[in-house]
Image (cartoon, grey):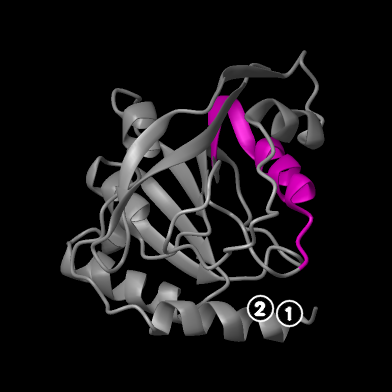
């Protein structure tokens, strides 16, 4: 599918959601990053910006990337409102054709799923290569379908974290898998409905 189709789709998804003054961070991010010394972070598919704002308030310098101009513009405005605009650089890009420059101490990839063609393994491999020694990449995927998900395909597959790691093909001499599990939690959708969902969590660290 054409890149412009993906842009239109995701702009529509974000435009259909009311802008929020205080988007919440993902729990898998906060439980993983709390206690780590702040540095340079990359938030791939930043969406509403809850993770980016949480990281910036914790002292991280964050590059936040999303294919949706609506998401990027809202996050830029929120960063100013929250007084962290000096630590947030929000950029619109299509990960099929480009990737943010630089190296990072943390790469956060939450729910990078799309109905459009995307070589996720290649994107995640590029992200892992952008880690500095000692840096971590946190990949959190859907492990179940929530009632509010845009993808209600009953045949949708959910690769395990180990399968995701195998697909990236990282050299075990350079990257270590620190976590690969499927915890469950109660989540709240955009309309306030709650449901129990499964997260597929993969955490890798660059050791050399």
Q: Which residues are magenta?
A: 117-140
**Residues tagged 2 and 1 counted as in contact (Cβ below 8 A):** yes
In the image, is residue 164 above or below residue 152? above
The number of numbered badges drawn on the structure is 2
Asked whether residue 129 is drawn in magenta, I would say yes
Q: Residue at x 26, y 53 (%)?
A: 24
Q: Is residue 184 above or below residue 60?
A: above
Residue 180, quarter of picture: top right
- Report which residue position mark 2 lands on: 6
7 relative to 30 in the view: left or right: right
Residue at the spot 78% in from the left edge and 82% down from the top edge: 2
Relative to residue 47, is residue 158 drawn left or right? right
Crowding at mark 2 (Cα within 10 Å: few <14, some 14-19, many 20+): some
- Give coordinates of residue 10: x percent, y percent: 54, 77
Query: x and y percent of residue 68 in the render?
Result: 52, 76
Label 1 sits on residue: 3
- 51 in relation to 49, above or below: above
Residue, x 67% and y 36% (percent of image)?
A: 128
Q: Nearer the viewer, residue 163 or 95?
A: 163
Above/below status of 165 relative to 62: above
Q: Quadrant of residue 26?
A: top left
Q: Find residue 146 and report its horizontal and vertical position in percent.
A: 45, 54
């Amino acid at each position: 599918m054409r890149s412009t189709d993906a842009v239109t789709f995701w702009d529509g998804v974000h435009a259909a959601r009311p802008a929020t003054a205080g988007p919440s961070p993902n729990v898998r991010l906060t439980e993983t990053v709390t206690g780590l010394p702040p540095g340079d972070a990359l938030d791939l598919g930043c969406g509403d910006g809850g993770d980016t704002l949480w990281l910036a308030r914790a002292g991280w310098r964050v590059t936040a990337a999303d294919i949706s101009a609506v998401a990027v513009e809202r996050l830029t405005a929120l960063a100013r409102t929250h007084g962290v605009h000096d630590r947030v650089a929000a950029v619109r890009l299509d990960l099929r054709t480009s990737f943010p420059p630089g190296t990072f101490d943390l790469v956060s990839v939450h729910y990078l799923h799309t109905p459009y063609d995307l070589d996720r393994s290649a994107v995640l491999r590029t992200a892992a290569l952008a880690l500095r020694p000692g840096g971590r990449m946190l990949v959190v995927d859907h492990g179940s379908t929530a009632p509010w998900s845009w993808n209600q395909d009953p045949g949708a597959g959910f690769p395990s974290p180990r399968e995701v790691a195998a697909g990236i093909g990282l050299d075990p001499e350079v990257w270590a898998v620190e976590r690969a599990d499927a915890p469950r939690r109660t989540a709240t959708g955009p309309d306030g409905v709650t449901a129990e969902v499964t997260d597929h969590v993969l955490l890798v660290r660059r050791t050399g």
